[in-house]
Image: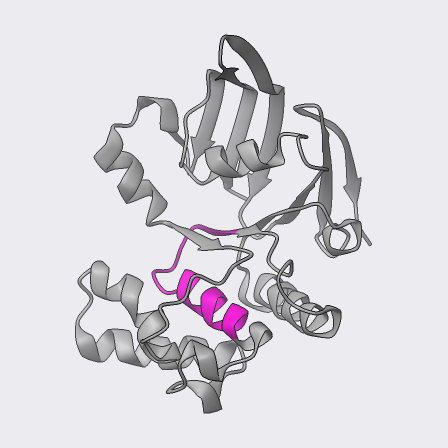
Amino acid sequence: MPTIVEAIDLKKTYMLGKVPVEALRGVNLKVETGDFVSILGPSGSGKSTMLNLIGALDKPTSGTMLIDGVDISKLNDNQLADLRRRIGFVFQFFNLIPRLTAKDNVELPMAIAEMNKAERTKRAVELLETVGLKDRINHKPAELSGGQQQRVAIARALANNPKFLLLDEPTGNIDSKTASEVITLIKNLNIEHNVSIIMVTHDQHLAREAKRTLQMFDGEIVSEVVNQ
């Protein structure tokens, strides 16, 4: 399988005043097309820094971060913005636009990509059907439950056929029953639709739903578990 994300001796140092803080200390990581990887760690372990680098939201201090074979350190701001458009972001807080319907929220990334209206409407409806919201396409976020809003966010993330989904605590803002439904959807997208997924979380139970779990601690990947 082609490699979509690869980190090679990845290091990231932040300055806290005059004190250097090593957020990442030589991380190596490889994710292939069709994989479902969770990055698990407590607060301060470096997982949020990893998320920022995998999402091309930041650049490493040293080492190499390759996204779809491209070294992000060598890209300018416009090239980084273009690369981000090929990543589907799903956050803990749904970040839907309140005045737009579910369909319009999903259409938005396609409108930005200048897809014609008929095509983007057709795809938005298909994606909302895929995530189980066929009967909610004209509802606004306030008319949807937390789980339904997260499903809209996932559909929106898939709008422009991204290379992979990058999930940041995707069940952190919903109840346990709804969280179970959302993770079932995520696993279905991975297994039945071959969507590549990288999920960052502090939740051990959620992390075990992935095919592989990478445990982070103090800026390093300290273990890898293949989940059954």
Q: Which sits in the foreground, 27 or 58?
A: 58
Q: Is residue 129 above or below residue 182?
A: below
Residue extending furthest toward the bottom: 135
Q: What residue lies at 65% left-to-right and 24% top-to-bottom? A: 219
Residue 112, horizontal then vertical, whole percent:
22, 60
At 70% from the left and 53% from the top, the residue drawn is 210
List the single residue furthest toward the top: 18
Q: Give above or below for 115 relative to 76.
A: below
Task: Looking at the picture, tell me which residue is in the foreground, 2 or 165.
Answer: 165
Q: Quadrant of the N terminus?
A: top right
Residue 118, magenta (yes or no) = no
Q: In the rendered structure, which segment of residues is drawn in magenta?
A: 149-166
Check residue 162 for magenta coloring.
yes
Which colour scheme appears in the figure?
A: one colour
Determine whether 118 is above or below 54 in the image.
below
Q: Is residue 151 left or right of residue 43?
A: left
> Could you tell me residue 50's position as x and y percent?
55, 33
Number of residue marks: 0
- Kindly indicate the quadrant of the structure image that contains residue 25: top right
**Would residue 137 be found to the left or right of residue 215 on screen?**
left
Image location (x, y in percent) of residue 122: 30, 80
Corner quadrant of residue 218: top right
Is residue 94 visible to the viewer in this orientation of the structure?
A: yes
Residue 158 at least partly seen: no
Q: The C terminus appears in which quarter of the rendering?
A: bottom right
The image quarter containing residue 189 is bottom right
Question: Farthest residue in the front direction?
Answer: 17
| Residue at 29%, 27% in the rendered image | 75
Q: Where is residue 123 in the image (x, y as percent from the top left)?
A: 34, 75
